[in-house]
Image: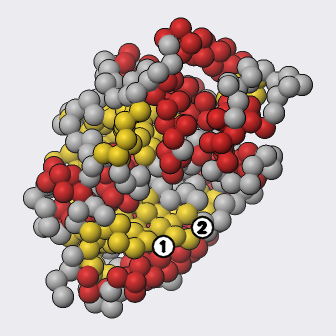
Amino acid sequence: MTPDLILSLDAGTTSTRAIAFGLDGGIVASCGRPITQHYPQPGWVEHDAAEIWRASRDCLLEVADTVGAARVAAIGITNQRETLVLWDAGSGEPLAPAIVWQDRRTADYCAGLKAAGHEPAVQAKTGLLLDPYFTGTKLRWALDNWPAVAAAANAGTLRAGTVESWLIWKLSAGAAHVTDATNASRTLLMDLGSCAWDADMLALFGVPAAILPRIVDCAGPLATTALLGGETPITGSAGDQQAAAIGQACLGPGELKATYGTGCFLLAHSGGVPPVSQHRLLATLAWRLAGVPAYALEGSIFTAGSAVQWLRDGLGLIAGSAETEALARSVPDSGGVVFVPALAGMGAPHWRPEARGMIAGLTAGTTRAHLARATLEAMGQQTADLLDALAADGVAAAALRVDGGMVANEWLCQDLADSLGVPVERPRCIETTALGAAMLAAVGAGLFADLAAAAAAMTGPDRRFAPVLPAPARVARRERWARAVRQALAD
């Protein structure tokens, strides 16, 4: 049997999924497993790396069993970025909990580095800002606070990496300790121009180079795995937001997408030269293929779908996220309620890790429908903040391509268009993160000549939402949002 499928592993924040894609971009089979969230202290978020591996392994095996392992031409991997995994090279087992990208435990450390004047040099080298979000500060904290991690570093057996690095290690039975360049670009340790670990950044954060993975391209012969019964090549890897941009065919300068999952992340492709933001956006890698990098500007919103999850699990206002669409439609507006969902601090363009969420405008007439609508409206307002920063950096959005689990909500898609004042385009496959990893793997396996050919075969549009809200109403909503944000940041 000629292999005709790409098996994509999407190791996300709240779940891990494996999806088998045909070379036309169609989903043939899929499997998902939840990932347990651990909150040991306020502002701390951890995962069990062993659970991530078990869930990933089981999903891959289940999908391969469903479609037939012989049909799998290659595996592509995409993952929650910035999350730090630490393991022992001898046992192959985790040495500590994985510190998740949302974790805020290094806020004071970052503030100290900023006060010492290090942020301009960090941004110039890495394209990033000093924030607990990124992996490098988490790694410094782990070396300082977990004795088992420090002992393994001293013994020469410590291995560190982001989630894809951990999974490739496990899939290859320890043969490959690698990280793709997009994930490396999120660590605060990689020089964005050379795509190599930077000696100055390693010294600043006190990170020994020997524990880090080798930086590789996003497509090509990255490793092999015997998990499916033969030697299956792993030929694609990228961080989830870069993979989603590829899955959305944002392959040329000025094309941009926003992914609405646990958080919201907007990437605008910027070409072959590292961009410089003057308005608190990040410069990041879009991909590296055949040793040649491409770049993007990024805006990171830490709370998107997790705000809906909070309505469900924290407040008990809804039984499931799908309820929010009907609730939002059931009222003509939010009743004056504005929700600033800074449940994990605020990302771009504010970068205030200490910020906390705030609900303004409550009255005796406020209902759960108003709260649900205000939660969804916050997605559009946060995204509008990012588009304003992009415009100030010289990138004007003609349209926004959207994906992620939240955009199955058509009310939300329309409200995004109304909040932004530009058309919103939803693809036929909203699993664009997994699709982007599959496209990279297909290119890496030689099934397509390049990403443009993969995009032509595997992607396509579903629906376009044009803005209908009059400009004065849009401006009034923006002003209410800005007032609420100022209040949240003043506390």
Q: Position of residue 160 (x, y in %)?
A: 46, 63
Label number found at residue 31: 1
Vertical side of 131 occupied by 381: above or below: above
Q: Nearer the viewer, residue 337 or 382?
A: 337
Q: Is residue 176 visible?
A: yes
Residue at 26% in and 45% down: 249
Q: Nearer the viewer, residue 7 or 222?
A: 7
Q: Locate the N terminus and report the quarter of the image it occupies.
A: bottom left
Vertical side of 114 occupied by 471: above or below: above
Task: Report the residue that reaches farthest toward the top.
Answer: 472
Vertical side of 196 occupied by 25: above or below: below
Left-right relation of 358 to 20: right
Label 2 and label 1: CA atoms lie apart by 11 Å
Q: Residues within 10 Å of mark 2 (few under 14, many from 20)?
A: some
Residue 15: image quadrant is bottom right
Q: Position of residue 342 (x, y in %)?
A: 66, 34
Q: Nearer the viewer, residue 356 or 203?
A: 356
Residue at 61% in and 30% down: 378
